[in-house]
Image: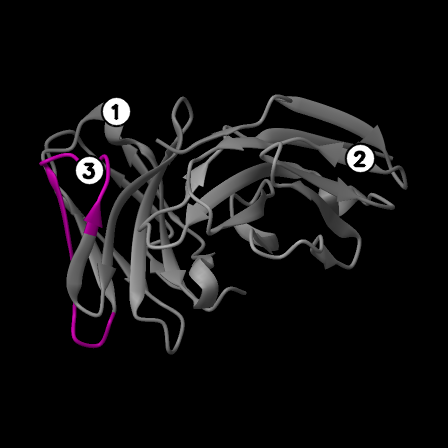
Amino acid sequence: AQTVTQSQPEMSVQEAETVTLSCTYDTSENNYYLFWYKQPPSRQMILVIRQEAYKQQNATENRFSVNFQKAAKSFSLKISDSQLGDTAMYFCAFHFQGAQKLVFGQGTRLTINP
Amino acid sequence: DSGVTQTPKHLITATGQRVTLRCSPRSGDLSVYWYQQSLDQGLQFLIQYYNGEERAKGNILERFSAQQFPDLHSELNLSSLELGDSALYFCASGGPEETQYFGPGTRLLVL
């Protein structure tokens, strides 16, 4: 069975700092997708970034980037120049090709302090 | 805005009652996924529909059922409600490359 583990239940940094959220996963599949979703206090689930396992290049979306280590089954999210609006719960999620659902980690609560 | 709509935003009801949650996927998406988010169990997959057909089932109780209509909107029916059914229910629309876009959710409170 596929599992996703986020080992940091909570993190807190100062505004403008860089923060890295960790995620590891377990699978025997070779073709899959990895995602980070953000859930702010409004509880909306917002897609932050996506990574295809067959791509070696790490995905980047503005201030958000990932460090994808396929052999280590690791998928961390780096937020640069953090902003107050980045305060949210962040979920790592996994979807292997042909599967019918996302498998989520338990989330990391990130607080950006002014 | 993800392009996925869910109604109602909030629902308060009593134990034993039945409710219907509604979802419209993004234009062009054929898949709809339902998830439940409760405080102690994170996000749990309930069920998926693709173009009107049930595609996969997750941890969905027998008291719960869903369907997807020809116009691709979907409804999740929850019956004989219990206190433990109080949760945030999300609908997600299946986009390209296995990407799911979530609606704003329906907050259900069972009293």
Label 2 chain ID: A
Q: Which disc number belongs to residue A19?
A: 2
Residue B47 x, y percent position in the rendering: 23, 48
Is A110 positioned to the left or the right of B47 in the image?
right
- For the view shown, which residue lies furthest in the right direction? A16
Label 1 sits on a secondary structure element that is: helix
Residue ID for mark 1: B84
Report if residue A106 lies within the magenta region. Answer: no
Instruction: Look at the image and give the residue range highlighted in magenta.
Output: B56-72
Residue B35 x, y percent position in the rendering: 33, 44
Label 2 sits on a secondary structure element that is: strand
State how far apart marks 1 and 2 are (Cα): 35 Å
Question: Please, is residue A104 above or below residue B52 in the view?
Answer: above
Q: Residue at x 42, y 26 (%)?
A: B39
Q: Are marks 1 and 3 in contact (CB under 8 Å)?
A: no
The answer to which of marks 1 and 3 sits earlier in the sequence is: 3
Instruction: Give the quadrant of residue A57.
Output: bottom right
In the rendered image, is residue B68 in sight?
no
Residue ID for mark 3: B60
**Which dot, 1 or 2, sits closer to the camera?**
2
Label 1 chain ID: B
Q: Residue at x 10, y 37 (%)?
A: B63
Q: Nearer the viewer, residue A89 or A69?
A: A69
Q: Are marks 1 and 3 on the same chain?
A: yes
In the rendered image, is residue B36 in sight?
yes
State how far apart marks 1 and 3 are (Cα): 13 Å
Is B72 positioned to the left or the right of B18 in the image?
right
Q: Nearer the viewer, residue A54 or B25?
A: A54
